Amino acid sequence: MKPAEAGEFLGAPRDGVVHLPARELDRRLAVADGQLRDRYPGEPTGRQPLHTVYVPADLIRTGLALRWGEQALAALAEHGLPYPEELHERIGRKLSTEPIEDLRVDFEDGYGRREDATEDAHARSVAAFLSARPAPFTGVRIKSLEADTRPRALRTLERLLDALGTIPPNFVITLPKVSSVDQVEALVSLCRQLEPAAGQLRFELQVEMPQAIMGPDGTCPLPAMIHASQGRCVGLHYGTYDYSAALGIAAACQSMEHPAADHAKQVMQVAAAGTGVRVVDGSTNVLPVGDTAAVHAAWALHLRLVRRSLERGFYQGWDLHPAQLPTRYAAAYGFFREGAPSAAARLRAWLDGRDSAAQRDSGARGTGYLDEPATARALSGFLRRAVACGALDIGEFGVDRSMLDPL
């Protein structure tokens, strides 16, 4: 064996054993390195909305988002949500200025089946509505690519995009009831054919079929679906009620916190980790309507479910009714504001001590935590989300802009 040149080895030979040259390891692992970079680019650092609001296409009207905010404020005025006083002004401001963060125009279950001419007309009229950017994030949910709804899904998308012309920022297509990698590949091909010169179409997949969690060969298709999207998939949305019904769970027991729901979402979370695809929780169909007692009961449930999702790392969910907006923001703002002081102190200690063992030890003694780089990234991400959604202002709890930069 020819002696290796200086600097080629990973370390000095021990006990006469010659180590494999570093460049040989690089050669052997080059393909794996490339696949790791391509398949797992890391978590996105841009803003993620707290929720997605689904509104049937036939109910879309100019000023819809502000009307939802007005209805949410009216519900608060009538029924009085018991949440901390410090959140009152902040939530009121949010409902007045940006009540809906992500608006999805629905041509699927919430819309139903219509005459072709009717859905064609709605697709064209919705294009003008979306062009005006009624919310920071927008999109459209088409019908599924299953055989019986496939022609209508294609027709709606064609007419919408033709009328839209230019793709608005933060616009996505939602594909419901995904059950195979083939459907994802077909949607990628469809996007290439239909997207205008200005902008690239992106989509999110709704996981509401058990076949998306476990395929016929006993493996989970979700990783293959994500990678088959060729970077176009930005989210996996859990469908609470379709998924539960498909498993035979009784209607009264269908819930975001059912063990079957937790299992599906944990599989989604693992499949999407590091890919840049975000996982979104579902909804509760218990609406805050009726007398004050009924509204308060529904609000208490929604508050608890939203908080539960946040604690499990699901930072976005669905809302189905204007009166769910107060509890969406109350739960999220409470969660972020409660965690911000500790997160800021720990992150500041880590930033100050990352280059010195003595400083790290001092920081650990001061906060009670010996945090690692991965935890520091999580702390920064937490504060970044808090500021982006309006729960926190720069300067509060010692948070400055340096803490919000991706680490």
Image (cartoon, grey):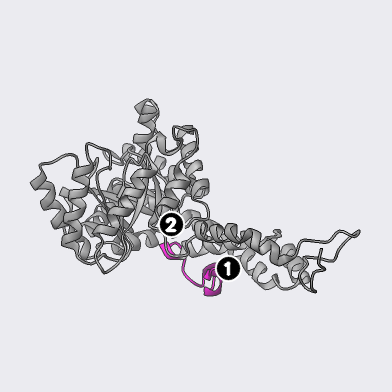
Callout 1: helix, strand or loop? loop
Residue at 38% from the left image edge and 57% from the top image edge = 232
Residue 255 vertical position relative to residue 88 in the rendered view, above or below: above
Crowding near the residue tagged with mark 2, few <14, some 14–19, many ≥20 C-alpha atoms within 10 Å: few
Callout 2: helix, strand or loop? helix
Residue 59 appears left or right of 283 = left
Q: Is residue 1 magenta?
A: no
Which residues, given as a range, are shown in magenta? 388-407
Residue at 48% from the left image edge and 64% from the top image edge = 45
Image coordinates for residue 138, horizontal then vertical, percent:
29, 58
Crowding near the residue tagged with mark 1, few <14, some 14–19, many ≥20 C-alpha atoms within 10 Å: some
Q: Quadrant of residue 148?
A: top left
Q: What distance separates the C-alpha of mark 2 from that of mark 1?
A: 34 Å
| Viewer-proximal residue among 213 and 50 | 213
Q: Is residue 392 magenta?
A: yes
Reading the image, the residue beneath label 2 is 85
